[in-house]
Image (spheres, helix red, strand yellow):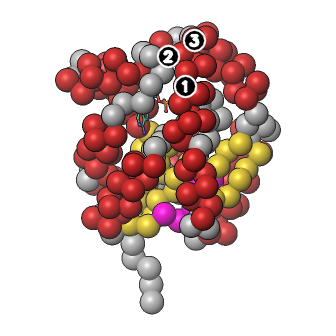
Amino acid sequence: MADNRKTFVVLMGAPGAGKGTQAKILQEVLGLPQVATGDLFRENLKNETELGKLAKTYMDKGQLVPDEVTVAMVRDRLSRPDCVSGAILDGFPRTPAQAIALNKLLEEFNGHINIVPFINVNQEVLITRLQKRSEIEGRADDNAETILTRMKVYREQTAPLLNYFQERELLVEIDGDRSVEVVSAELQDVIRQAS
Ligand code: AMP
């Protein structure tokens, strides 16, 4: 029987692992939109919405925006017409509660997770990359203190999801300590194999 459910790819990896860069390439290749919660929050911040003002108080400190707020924003984003075939999730879920909420959203939107690529990069490389990004993009949360908080938040709240997805046989680890092109080629390979 044909599987007519929407397809979701969940990109996992620490801050600075290259999820955003890879998601942007994948969105062209797969024809699925990149849904990046960090970008959505930053858009709200720029437009000075109530959501943006709330998110800013957490983002500036490198902490996670509360789950209910984040899940409601993702739900709204997935309801838009460009997600008709699914999406590439970048930066969501980031907590066990968000992973459970995602399951409910998948039921609601008739979707399923195809694969969860985990872009693995070692911590020193990550910190150097984030510091470089702060010089280039000037992101307020790429300063030294916030970077350390984000790493800690990742280890404590997000990394446990790797096990969660592994148990569901969805996780595929990719060595992210290589060029953008090599990582992208491998990502495309593993996604194709999972389809
Ligand atoms: P990112 O661009 O993915 O590094 O996200 C930047 C910031 O946005 C994070 O440090 C959090 O404050 C917030 N954020 C992004 N995604 C989430 C999420 N799934 N849950 C909670 N907060 C998030």
Q: Amino acid at mark 1?
A: Arg
Q: Quadrant of ligand 1?
A: top left
Q: Is mark 2 within 8 Å of ligand 1?
A: yes
Q: Is residue 65 magenta?
A: no
- Residue visible at 39% across and 76% down? 4
- Residue visible at 61% across and 55% down? 163
- Say whether disc 3 or disc 1 marks the residue closer to the N-terminus: 3
What span is colored magenta in the figure? Answer: 113-117
Is the stretch drawn in magenta largely helix, strand or loop?
Answer: strand
Which structural element holds mark 2? helix
Vertical side of 52 occupied by 73: above or below: below
- Say whether disc 2 or disc 1 marks the residue closer to the N-terminus: 2
Q: Residue tagged by mark 2? A: 141
Mark 2 and mark 1 residues within 8 Å of each other at the beta carbon: yes
Q: Is residue 29 left or right of residue 88?
A: right
Q: Is residue 99 left or right of residue 26?
A: left
Single out the mark in the foreground, 2 or 3.
3
Quarter placement of the C terminus: bottom right
Which structural element holds mark 1? helix
Q: Residue tagged by mark 3? A: 145
Q: Is mark 3 within 8 Å of ligand 1?
A: no
Q: Look at the image and tell me whether residue 165 can be seen.
A: yes
Q: Residue tagged by mark 1? A: 150
In the foreground, 11 or 165: 165
